[in-house]
Image (cartoon, helix red, strand yellow):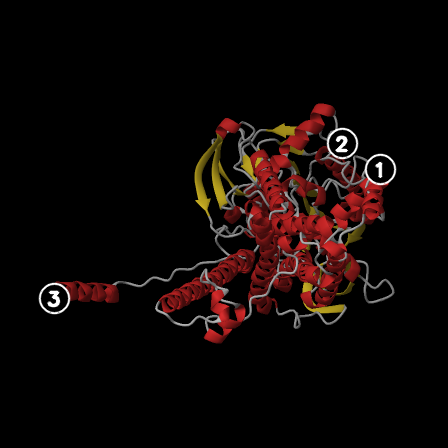
């Protein structure tokens, strides 16, 4: 005993003296929601299980008491005790209901089931049908009409009244309304608030009204059915309820954030698609099997499950919703009041997108997802496609730093390294606090306009870009609520659908931005004072309206276009393409048709020769659901100032996105040394080591950052070496 006390004391002293270190952790809100649902389901399940156990235990105790009481009665009779009339009728040791109640053995009556099969077999002799009635009945049951009547009775006949069917219909309809409408839509609106230009308060009442309408309709559709039709409808509804809940809670775990990438079989993995489809089929098969079997014990089990499962799912989701709802703060969204949004926040707008300086211009154009493969495909089809880019140099050995717009844009705008375990808001604020290369350009007397999207490239009311971009404005707009609800419903179907059908319901996340409606009659609301969103055809319309000359020693323009990124909405003629008909290569061609018109007008204004123009991509084609297995260089075309009338040149210099800051600052006449070397200062034969960070989601729902070291030609996969894989343990924000 003393030895044990000594050991305990020693451990207490060691723990007390041990140094303490803070441990920081982050759990994505969506993950928290699912964990809360799982824990709630377990608690409810354990509670119900305990209740059933207690009930069964009480039944066993009651049966034992009955047997013991009967035994004492028999012993008493054998000892000469006078038996009553009721005891003589219970020679086998059974008591009547009245005796059991009087003796206190049971405290409730035991009802006799009226539909007990043995009772239905007894027909009094005087009620038996006559020979003529039997013959007439037999005639009615023969022939097609009789078969149809028997089939209708088999299909529609039901001893359960409407009141008995109603509770099951109510619970299953409630489960479907919560699982397929109310919970996932509200969850999406809360967890993706930064992506949506409207607040939860503006849409929640419509969501609840739609959920209530769905609840009423499904309840009536189920309750009016009878017999086997009712059983079949309940089985199908319960199967959809189970599959939908499991899909959004467990099966979607390996998909990660929806960032605009398609979710086809190749991206998700064929095995993942097949396993997910098999799970749906197994659930449907099991529910139909137990639900349609006619044995009493199976029916009894299914009736209980049909009541218990919806209650469990509804409770789990409501508890999860209540846990995340307070963090949404939907009623006091800054700058948002009612249907009209008069924000005090600043946004990068379309203002001045066609402005160019009469002197020097630095034009930096991003074609999102401008993969080198698209350039190679265009050149293979038409070797002279880029010949009109006179004065340009095509760098075919260029790589990006990351495989997504965030954090790639903030990384090359500021030069600040990104740790994928840092929260988006924290990294964005800290990176811009260190400064951006655009500030060095402005120090040379240049004006600057920047056109990129919130929140992927900036946030916090664009305060980071005050004094950097001249196209910052406060913006007023209203929300097209029906359109916003429509997009939320599409996103909802995407979340609930099995993997095999997700690509059919895929939508780009930035479609929510199109719910913003500007007042055309407001004179103060100019065409330029609209929040900038990548819209290549709108940019084309602005260019066709003509470029304008502004005064000043120079002007810097950064334009982030959709470029080669999905969805593929334009064709090679820069015309709107029918949904599902476009391709990355055709859309890239259309983008260069737009840029060719831009460059033509620069030449017409006489400012093309002295302009420095960079065309590249912020990242290559998205590969977000697996480890990278092929080379992914990014297209890059650069025209230095003073270059004109020279055919397109080709360079194999090992460059990267890290060289663009120095190129732009040097073009403005500033000190580019702190930003590294320009594109043209890197020799073709240099052994430059570059790093590319590839973020992806595994089939197990893990979030991994794979770091590749590239030495030599980036087009050769053998030159890509995987040096590290970091399991983040948190959801990425793209």
Left or right relative to 580: residue 110: left
Question: Mark number for residue 143?
Answer: 1
Q: Is residue 176 above or below residue 339?
A: above
Residue 383: tell me if it is visible: no
Is label 3 in contact with label 2 (beta carbons under 8 Å)? Answer: no
Q: Can you name the residue that lies furthest to the right here?
A: 521
N-term-proximal mark, 3 vs 2: 3
Q: Earlier in the sequence, mark 1 or mark 3?
A: 3
Q: Residues within 10 Å of mark 1 (few under 14, many from 20)?
A: few
Q: Do the residues under discs 2 and 1 have CB atoms within 8 angstroms?
A: no
Splitting the image into 4 quarters, where does residue 342 fall?
bottom right
In this view, the mark in front (1 or 3): 1
- The percent position of residue 463, horizontal first and vertical second, equals 62, 64
In the picture, measured across the screen, residue 263 lies left or right of residue 73, that is right
What is the quadrant of the N terminus in the image? bottom left
Q: Position of residue 382 (x, y in %)?
A: 74, 25
**Mark pair 3, 2: CA separation:** 92 Å
Please tell me which residue lies in front, 19 or 496.
496
Q: Nearer the viewer, mark 2 or mark 1?
A: 1
Q: Secondary structure at mark 2?
A: loop
Q: Residue at x 42, y 65 (%)?
A: 70
Horizontal side of residue 261 vs 478, given as left or right: left
Position of residue 606 in the picture relative to residue 666 (left or right): right
Quickly name the residue at label 2. Answer: 388
Residue 2's disc is 3
Q: CA distance from mark 1 to mark 3?
A: 94 Å
Query: For the point 69% across and 61% down, which residue is it?
Result: 164
Residue 548 coordinates in the image, percent (x, y): 81, 51
How many residues crowd around disc 3 within 10 Å: few (fewer than 14), some, or many (20 or more)? few
Q: Nearer the viewer, residue 143 or 387?
A: 143
């Amino acid at each position: 005993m003393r030895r044990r006390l000594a050991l305990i004391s020693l451990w207490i002293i060691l723990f007390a003296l041990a140094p303490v270190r803070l441990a920081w952790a982050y759990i994505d809100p969506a993950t928290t929601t699912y964990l809360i649902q799982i824990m709630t389901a377990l608690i409810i399940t354990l509670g119900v299980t305990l209740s059933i156990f207690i009930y069964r235990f009480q039944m066993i105790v009651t049966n034992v008491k009955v047997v013991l009481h009967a035994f004492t009665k028999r012993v008493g009779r054998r000892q000469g005790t006078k038996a009553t009339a009721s005891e003589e009728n219970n020679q086998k040791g059974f008591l009547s209901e009245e005796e059991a109640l009087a003796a206190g053995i049971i405290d409730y009556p035991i009802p006799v089931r009226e539909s007990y099969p043995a009772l239905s077999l007894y027909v009094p002799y005087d009620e038996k049908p006559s020979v003529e009635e039997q013959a007439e009945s037999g005639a009615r049951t023969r022939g097609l009409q009789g078969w149809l009547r028997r089939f209708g009775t088999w299909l529609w006949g039901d001893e359960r009244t409407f009141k008995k069917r109603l509770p099951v219909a109510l619970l299953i309809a409630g489960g479907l309304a919560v699982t397929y409408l109310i919970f996932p839509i509200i969850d999406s609106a809360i967890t993706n608030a930064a992506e949506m230009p409207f607040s939860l308060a503006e849409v929640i009442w419509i969501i609840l009204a739609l959920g209530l309408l769905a609840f009423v309709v499904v309840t009536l559709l189920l309750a009016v059915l009878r017999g086997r039709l009712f059983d079949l409808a309940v089985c199908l509804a319960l199967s959809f309820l189970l599959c939908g809940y499991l899909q959004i809670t467990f099966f979607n775990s390996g998909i990660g954030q929806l960032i605009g990438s398609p979710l086809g079989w190749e991206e998700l993995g064929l095995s993942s698609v097949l396993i997910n489809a098999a799970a749906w089929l197994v659930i449907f098969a099991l529910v139909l099997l137990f639900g349609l079997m006619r044995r009493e014990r199976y029916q009894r089990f299914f009736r209980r499950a049909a009541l218990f499962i919806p209650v469990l799912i509804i409770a789990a989701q409501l508890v999860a919703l209540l846990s995340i709802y307070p963090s949404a703060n939907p009623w006091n969204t800054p700058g948002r009041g009612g249907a009209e949004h008069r924000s005090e926040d600043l946004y990068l707008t379309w203002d001045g997108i066609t402005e160019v300086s009469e002197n020097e211009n630095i034009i930096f154009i991003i074609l999102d997802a401008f993969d080198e493969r698209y350039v190679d495909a265009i050149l293979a089809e038409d070797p002279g496609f880029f010949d009109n880019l006179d004065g340009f140099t095509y760098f075919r050995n260029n790589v990006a730093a990351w495989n997504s717009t965030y954090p790639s844009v903030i990384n090359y705008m500021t030069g600040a390294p990104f740790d994928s375990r840092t929260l988006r808001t924290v990294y964005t604020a800290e990176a811009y606090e260190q400064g951006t290369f655009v500030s060095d350009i402005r120090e040379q007397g240049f004006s600057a306009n920047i056109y990129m999207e919130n929140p992927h490239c900036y946030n916090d009311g664009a305060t980071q870009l005050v004094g950097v971009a001249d196209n910052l404005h406060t913006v007023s707009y209203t929300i097209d609520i029906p359109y916003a609800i429509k997009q939320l419903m599409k996103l909802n179907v995407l979340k609930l659908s099995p993997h095999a059908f997700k690509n059919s319901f895929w939508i780009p996340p930035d479609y929510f931005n199109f719910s913003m409606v500007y007042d055309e009659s407001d004179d103060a609301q100019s065409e330029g004072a609209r929040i900038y969103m990548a819209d290549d055809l709108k940019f084309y319309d602005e260019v066709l309206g003509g470029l304008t000359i502004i005064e000043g020693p120079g002007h810097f323009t950064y334009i982030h276009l959709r470029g080669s990124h999905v969805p593929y909405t334009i064709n090679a003629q820069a015309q709107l393409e029918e949904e599902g008909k476009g391709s990355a290569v055709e859309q890239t061609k259309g983008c260069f048709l737009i840029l060719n018109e831009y460059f033509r007008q620069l030449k017409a204004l006489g400012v093309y020769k002295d302009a420095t123009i960079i065309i590249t991509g912020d990242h290559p084609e998205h590969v977000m659901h697996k480890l990278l297995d092929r080379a992914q260089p990014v297209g890059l075309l650069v025209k230095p100032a003073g270059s004109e009338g020279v055919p397109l040149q080709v360079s194999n210099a090992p460059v990267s996105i890290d060289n663009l800051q120095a190129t732009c600052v040097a073009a403005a006449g500033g000190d580019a040394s702190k930003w590294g070397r320009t594109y043209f200062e890197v020799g073709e034969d240099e052994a430059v080591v570059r790093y590319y960070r590839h973020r992806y989601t595994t089939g197990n729902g893990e979030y991994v950052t794979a770091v590749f070291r590239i030495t030599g030609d980036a087009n050769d996969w053998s030159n890509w070496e995987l040096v590290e894989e970091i399991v983040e343990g948190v959801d990425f924000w793209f």
